Structures are given as C-alpha cells and as structure tokens.
Image (cartoon, rainbow, N blue to C red):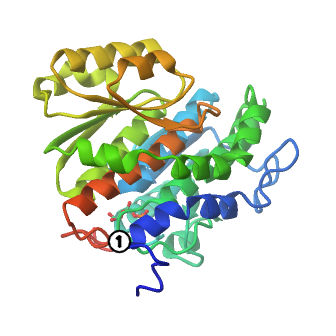
Amino acid sequence: EAAEKGGYDHYMLKEIQEQPTSLRQTLEGRIREESVSLESFPPGSFTDVSTVQFVACGTSYHAGLYGSHLLSEGGVPATTHLASEYAVYPPPIDEDTLVIAVTQSGETADTLEALRVAKEHGARTLAITNVVGSTAARESDDALLIRAGPEIGVAATKTFSSQVATLLLVANRLIEDVTGELLDGHLDRLESLRSLPSFVQTGLDTSQAPAVADQYLSDGHFFIGRGNGVPVALEAALKFKEITYEHAEGFPAGELKHGPLALVTADTPVFVVCTGRDASKLESAIREVQTRGAPVIAVAPRSMSDIIDTADETLTVPATHPDLVPILANVQLQLVAYHAAAKLDRAIDKPRNLAKSVTVE
Ligand code: G6P
C-alpha cells in the first residue's frame, strides 16, 4: 500500500497532488483551436434542449452547482438538485429537459434513482462520471467521462476538479446549441482552461496551506463566497468536516447577516473564496466578521489587492479567468482540510461513518 501511495502519507494527499495530471487527462483532445470537441457531442447535439437539470450528491452536487451557474450565466435555464430529494419530489420534467447526473462512481443509489425518475418523465439523460461502464453510464442516454483516474481516498478531490473542468467544456457546447450564440469571451475561457493544469501546479508548488491549517484550527470554520465561489465554499466546508470531524459551514457571503453571523467569534476562522469578481461585496462581508473578532483568510488571486489588504491572511492563487479561479481556490482549501486533519491525526483516507460510494438510498 505504501508503494501505491507514491511516497505520500495518504491517498488523499497523493490525489490532491495529482490534479495537474488528472486535469490534463480530462482536457486531452477536447479543446480545439477555437472550439470544444466532445467525443459523442458534435455541434448541434443539444439544440432540442430547453432546460438543464443537474442531479448529484455530496461533492458531485457542488460540481453540479458550478455547472448550473455556468449555464445560467450563459443564458441556458439550469438548476441543480440533490438527487435524494429530486427522486421523490421531482420538479417539472419533459422531453426537452436534459438531466445531467454528475457522479464520480456512477453507482450512488440516490443519483441512479433520480436518473430513473427523469427517464420515466421522458427527459434526455447524460451521465458525467469517472467510471467506464458504471450503472449511471449504462442507464443514461449518453455518458461523458471525466478521465480523472482512480480515486481511492473517500474524500473526493481530483474528481471534483475534473468534474468542473468537464462541465466547463459541456457548458460551452450547451450554450452554443441552446441559445444559438457563442458564450461572450468563450475563446478567453477556453484558452485559460488549456492552462488550468499548469495553474493548479503553480498553486500546489507555492501553497501556504500547511501553515494556515496549523494556525487557524478551531472547532468552527466558515467558508463563504459569491457566484461560483459558493459551490467551492460548500465543497471546502464538506471536505473540512469529512476529514477533520470539526464543524464547518459553507454558504453564500450574502447570507452571513441572515443567521450565521450569530455564531461568529474570535474562534471562527472565515475563509473567503474570491474569484476575481464581487470585490466590494466580499470586502463588506470580511469587515462584518472582522468586527466580531474573526480572523479572515482570503483565498484570492494576487490581483484582488484590496481584499488581500483587508484579510488577515491570504492563500494566493494564480490569476486566471474568474470561472476557473474557484477550482484553484478549491485546491488550496483541499490542502487546508488535509493538513488540519493530519494535525488531528484523523483517519484521512477512510473517515469514520463514511463510504466512497453509497449504494443504498
Ligand atoms: C459519497 C462520497 C462523497 C461523494 C458522494 C457522491 O458520499 O463519500 O465523496 O461525493 O458519495 O458520490 P458520486 O460517486 O456519486 O460522485
């Protein structure tokens, strides 16, 4: 087993470090000069689609949230649903609905059940998965592989990044087919996506996460963001509680004042996911928690200098397209969770009560 961990103490750390490689595999051959090339989906594949619904659980649900945000911003009506709820309380679905199941394993019972409900209602279905021949891939009309390679750690890391990268590609195609127009600035985003693996590498090589994890370990952590920083705030909190067993909450920064602020004390480190957008709104959230004595750790590109000056600490990420910065921020927060859990000597690769794949509803 030690050999399989490639010299790392845990599979989770190995898988975090593998992300430049796994992302290269995800993107390989899928970005052409000026367009996206998705094996089974030539241009025009989705012209009949009017609405997109993502169904997923856990980390994959956060990737789904990222996906629906990208689509909505591009003019395609899209929502993301927790599969367990969708299966029992489905929203309106018809044959113009594309239901995308995001599932690393392709075997999560709740997600499979949601897919079956979608099919019963006549929806077209697509599985975005890491496992060739998985049940989700077989039962959906189409499947698209994220090609992240096997993931052993129960806490999903590299597969989240590959899911989001895949969704960025799919979003381009869907926006073009459904709206009949190319996404504004789509070439810029594609160009940045091509460089994503090397940005992730830079982020890994220069990370201050071990020191931050050490300094800000507490029994209550907040993770906030806006826009596509929100799924990453949720994902970071999930990762943190899964492997450290300490309390962590993630939510949109604007919600602070509607409840969570009551919990903020000097012992509540607040991690702020900054994408390059929404600087002034995030700054006011930072001041709100600082007034209550909370230390603020910004996860931000260097270009957000006002945020960096206001925060108590910064985890810097390479500056790139704002739709990609959250992926880079997430890598830093994976490392924070990992190092905090290592300090607490937790069973990082197999946290108590959790399973890699949950095959019961
Ligand atoms: C379990 C795992 C999570 C995962 C979720 C969904 O709860 O512990 O890491 O995100 O299942 O799994 P899936 O294979 O459908 O992505």
Q: Is residue 95 among what the camera can see?
A: no
Q: Quadrant of the C terminus?
A: bottom left
Pointer 1 residue: 356
Three-letter amino acid code at disc 1?
Answer: Lys
Rendered residue at 19%/70% (across/down): 352
Rendered residue at 29%/72% (across/down): 355
**Is 267 on the left or on the right of 164, as rendered?**
left
Which sits in the foreground, 305 or 42? 305
Label 1 sits on a secondary structure element that is: loop
Q: Position of residue 183 (x, y in %)?
A: 73, 30
Q: Quadrant of the N terminus?
A: bottom left
The number of callouts visible is: 1
Which sits in the foreground, 354 or 345? 345
Above-or-below relation of 227 to 236: above
Rendered residue at 47%/38% (across/down): 79
| Rendered image quadrant of residue 137 | bottom right
Which sits in the foreground, 334 or 7? 7
In which of the image's four quarters is ligand 1 placed? bottom left
Above-or-below relation of 41 to 180: below
Which sits in the foreground, 255 or 285? 285
Q: Is residue 138 among what the camera can see?
A: yes
Q: Position of residue 238 (x, y in %)?
A: 30, 50
- At label 1, counting other C-alpha atoms closer than 10 Å, the crowd grade (few under 14, some 14-19, many 20 or more) is some
Q: Position of residue 320 (x, y in %)?
A: 64, 34
| Rendered image quadrant of residue 282 | top left
**Is 265 on the left or on the right of 215, as rendered?**
left
Q: Position of residue 310 (x, y in %)?
A: 37, 17
Q: Is label 1's Cβ within 8 Å of ligand 1? A: yes
